[in-house]
């Protein structure tokens, strides 16, 4: 998503920056907060907890982006819709009073376009993720997550594309709605056996992205 309007807006202001270390939480689901947070640097993960205590991961964010849902423009406080946890050595986030942010949006046409695109992209991501979860099964769901990681963190190396970010089988399981990390481990071994991936310093090296895509219903 084009975030030039957001970049220009932040450059004109002097918002405080919150710094969080690895595995620290910025927000917990259901806790009230009156700020909007925008990721400046680092990687964060959003997730929700089911009533039976299971965690379900939503997405990784590693670009300049609003990481807390904006909701309506009138409420000073809102309940955090999900957990936000730092997944890099540290992360920096702009902290903006949410009412002030909405006032600025209403006075800035380019920011209004950004917010419309933000909601449109969120909706499309949610619809696509629901479709993939329902239609792909466990094997396809894991391939879908690897493809997302490939797209977000991939860097070209001699043997293929390295996902330059350490992701555990447990984390992948939580993205895919799979109860046991051992199930993901078996699927990863199958992908290794067919030459689609291999592991390099705990990171996934994608050797044949077409074999991954063959198992995904887009």
Image (cartoon, helix red, strand yellow):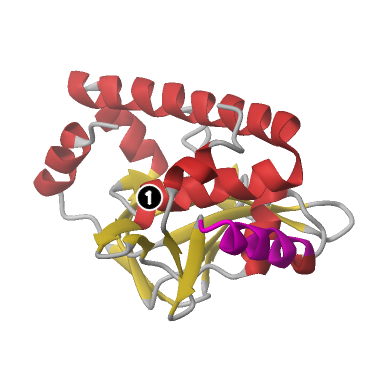
Outermost residue, front side: 194
Magenta residues, as a range? 183-195
Which residue is located at x 43 percent, y 81 percent?
A: 201
Horizontal side of residue 214 vs 40, given as left or right: right
Tell me what residue is drawn at x 51 percent, y 58 percent.
Answer: 195
* Residue 32 in view here: yes
Coordinates of residue 73 in the picture (x, y in percent):
45, 28
Vertical order, 73 against 43 (above or below): above
Q: Position of residue 62 (x, y in %)?
A: 35, 55
- Does 173 lie within the magenta span? no
**Quick one: 214 or 16, which is closer to the camera?**
214
* Magenta segment main secondary structure: helix
Q: Which structural element holds mark 1?
A: helix
| CA neighbours of label 1 inside 10 A, class few (<14), some (14 to 19), many (20+) | some
Locate residue 204 relative to residue 81 in the image: left or right: left
Residue 86 in view (yes/no)? no
Q: Looking at the figure, which quarter contains the C terminus?
A: top right
Q: Which residue is mark 1?
A: 152
**175 vs 87: above or below:** above
27 or 39: nearer the viewer? 39
Point out residue 165 in the picture as x, y percentages from the top left corner. 41, 67
Q: Hey, which residue is sitting farthest right in the picture?
A: 52
- Residue at (40%, 41%) from the top-left corner? 98
Q: Is residue 182 above or below residue 128?
A: below
The part of the image, by quadrant, that contains residue 169 is bottom right
Query: Residue 207 or 37: which is nearer the viewer?
Result: 207
């Amino acid at each position: 998503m084009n975030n030039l309007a957001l970049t220009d807006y932040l450059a004109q202001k002097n918002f405080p920056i919150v710094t969080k270390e690895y595995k620290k939480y910025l927000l917990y689901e259901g806790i009230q907060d009156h700020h909007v947070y925008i990721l400046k640097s680092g990687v964060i993960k959003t997730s929700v907890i089911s009533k039976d205590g299971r965690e379900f991961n939503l997405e990784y964010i590693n670009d300049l982006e609003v990481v807390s849902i904006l909701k309506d423009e009138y409420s000073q406080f809102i309940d955090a819709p999900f957990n936000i946890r730092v997944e890099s050595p540290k992360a920096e986030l702009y902290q903006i009073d949410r009412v002030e942010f909405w006032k600025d949006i209403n006075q800035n046409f380019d920011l209004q376009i950004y917010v419309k695109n933000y909601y449109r992209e969120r909706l499309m991501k949610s619809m696509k993720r629901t479709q993939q979860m329902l239609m792909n099964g466990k094997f396809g769901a894991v391939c879908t997550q690897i493809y997302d990681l490939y797209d977000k963190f991939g860097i070209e190396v001699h043997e293929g594309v390295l996902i330059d970010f350490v992701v555990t089988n447990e984390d992948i399981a939580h993205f895919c709605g799979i109860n046991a990390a051992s199930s993901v481990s078996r699927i990863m071994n199958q992908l290794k056996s067919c030459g689609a991936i291999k592991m390099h310093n705990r990171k996934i090296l994608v050797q044949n992205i077409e074999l991954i895509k063959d198992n995904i219903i887009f």
